[in-house]
Amino acid sequence: PTARRGRECEQLKIGGIRATELTAKHGSPLYVVDEDAARTRAREIREALQTEALRIGTEATVYYAGKAFLCVEVARWMAEEGLAIDVASGGELAVALAAGVDPARIGFHGNNKSEAEIARAVRAGVGTIIIDSEIETQRIAHAAAAAGTTQRVRLRVNSGVHASTHDFLATSHEDQKFGQPLRDAPRLVRGILAHESLEFVGLHCHIGSQIFATDGFRESARRLLGTYRELAEITGADIPELNLGGGFGIAYTSAQAEEAPAIAEIARELADIVADGAREHGIAIPKLAFEPGRAVIGQAGVTLYTVGTTKTVQLAESDVAGDPADLGYSERLYVSVDGGMSDNARPALYGADYQVRIANRVSDAAPALVRVVGKHCESGDIVVQRDVIPGDVRPGDTLAVAATGAYCWSLSSNYNYMPRPPVVAVRGGTSRVIVRGQTEDDLLAQSVMVADAIENGD
Ligand code: LLP
């Protein structure tokens, strides 16, 4: 009995609650966010960046990039931990405002904000709107003039740095949709100054996402600062701010743990570059701004699934040849769970890696090479590409996939009419729903019924 108790203690707990208790209460699949982990990380990142800014004689604002995962509760946590919020659509703006975030501490992004979204942001008193194209300069100026206000704006530029990450996640080389080439900044800033309803506060550059090597961030900061003297001559005053975006990578697997950059290190290196650049160009050190999303919330999230079926597939030489990690295994155990690419699109979209463990029991069974797959009708519907876990994993087991806090719920879909799972926050042994899950009825209600259509004369 003692041994048995000991083993039960090893069942996975999140925020002090057993995974099995969470699924029993809230269902499966289930997104779980550890509130303390999210808050602690938010605070650590903010403090690291602000401490380094202070060291070089300036300040830093840290925006939480809401696209990673936003709901009213998370926006509130971030505001309480001293972060501002970056939103990228009218919907995200509505969530931040509903959470009571001070509008002055909201930054509004996007390469195609609608006139209605811009007008709403201006009227709400959003702190800064990031201009992504010349057309937007006109639109924002017009909206601000109509509202009888002056809108603070940043100009988003491409520094031309090609960050070493997945192609879809790199955003500051020239041939992609975001921002304007850095060399056009002087002309665009003149365009902004032509409008009395706009106040230009500085440049913005986000070089990409899930970046491990810090040299891209440094090079980008260096290039941006290289234009600040010329821009100051155009505006007639020091350029007050510099926003270096987000993109700090995190470890999704234990293999990545060594490589992921420590935030303190990034903060120090960036502060040094900014201080050196300002000295070199004879300009005042601007206030800094950053926009991390993934680094704040990614590792605070876990997704729980229930195993439905398993099957073993023999591996041919050719199957493992291209995949050195599979060498040594003659078979692969496919483990199908009750979710998939609808709750985590990242493996299908970016070939993202995750790790899994059995959460409801401890097993001494011999390890097996597993691939966790979802229940959608696509062979690319993979949750965990490759991991090694006890080979007796079986129907009814609860599986926990780590580091699903960023870009999982926010990229989720209803593919195959799968309802979105709820998100629960756990803290100090209690859990509460912070985003309601969908039911089949919710999805069915969106489908116009033939009878209704006839009634409506459609
Ligand atoms: N600022 C801007 C302007 C951005 O476009 C982004 C991310 C961020 C900040 C936050 O980046 P982070 O610190 O989270 O890396 N769906 C992809 C990531 C797309 C990132 C889009 N923009 C993924 O799941 O990996």
Image (cartoon, rainbow, N blue to C red):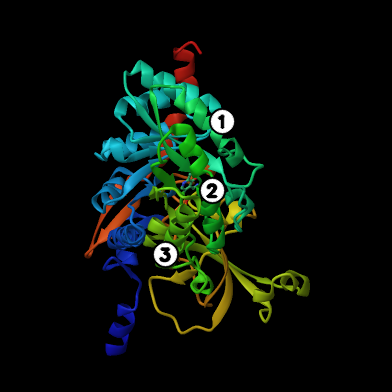
Q: Which mark is residue 268?
A: 3
Whether residue 61 sits left or right of residue 247 in the image: it is left
In the image, residue 309 sits, relative to residue 244, either above or below, namely below
On the question of residue 385 being in view, the answer is: yes
Q: Earlier in the sequence, mark 1 or mark 3?
A: 1
Q: Earlier in the sequence, mark 2 or mark 1?
A: 1
Image coords of residue 37 (percent x, y): 32, 63
Image marks 1 and 3: residues in contact by CB distance under 8 Å = no
40 or 148, which lies in front?
148
**Residue at the top extreme of this rendering:** 457
Amino acid at circle 2: Gly
- Quarter occupied by residue 90: top left
Amino acid at circle 1: Arg
Foreground disc of the pair 1, 3: 1
Does the beta carbon of the residue at mark 3 sit less than 8 Å from ligand 1? no
Task: Give the spatial CA distance, label 2 vs label 1.
Answer: 16 Å
Foreground disc of the pair 3, 2: 2
**Location of mark 2 (residue):** 226
Image coords of residue 392 (percent x, y): 51, 77
10 Å neighbourhood of mark 3: few (<14), some, or many (≥20)? some
**Location of mark 1 (residue):** 187
- Badge 1 marks a residue whose secondary structure is helix
- Badge 3 marks a residue whose secondary structure is helix
Task: Give the spatial CA distance, label 3 vs label 2.
Answer: 19 Å
